[in-house]
Amino acid sequence: MKFKVGDKVRIKEDLSCNKCYKTAAVKDMEKYKGKIAKVKRISHLPFSEGYKLDIDDMEWIWSDDMLEPCETRFKKSDLKNGDIVTCRDD
């Protein structure tokens, strides 16, 4: 497994239910493309090893090939009402 519990990940921008992944992707997962999530649990079920994420209330199992490490940069669309942002020059 590439990630561990507590890691921040980004769901790949090109996620598609028409592609083959280590776990099945469904149409409802596509709405999370490009979003940042936190790994909450690692699932070791037969035929569907992967990650449970906080972004979807742990509804789906996400595989390594659907995710990428999250860089410290984010987009404005990643923010939610109530988030606090600190701006730095460095």
Image: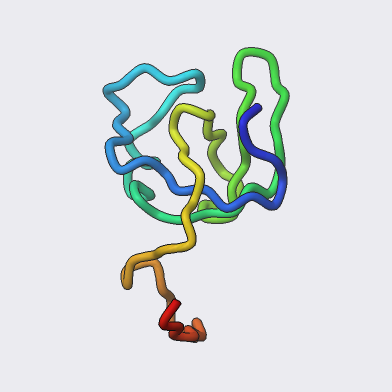
Residue at horizontal 37 percent and vertical 40 percent from the top: 12
Give the farthest residue toward the top: 47
Res. 4 image quadrant: top right
Evaluate whether residue 41 shows in this view. yes
Residue at horizontal 41 percent and vertical 73 percent from the top: 79
Residue 40 appears at what percent x and percent y?
68, 49
Residue 6 appears at what percent x and percent y?
69, 52
Compared with residue 88, is residue 7 higher up or lower down, i.e. above or below?
above
Compared with residue 74, is residue 67 higher up or lower down, i.e. above or below?
above
Residue at horizontal 50 percent and vertical 22 percent from the top: 23
Is residue 41 toward the left or the right of residue 73 in the image? Answer: right
Res. 80 image quadrant: bottom left
Is residue 4 toward the left or the right of residue 81 in the image? Answer: right
Is residue 9 toward the left or the right of residue 7 in the image? Answer: left
Q: Pick the quarter of the image with the N terminus.
A: top right
Evaluate whether residue 57 shows in this view. no
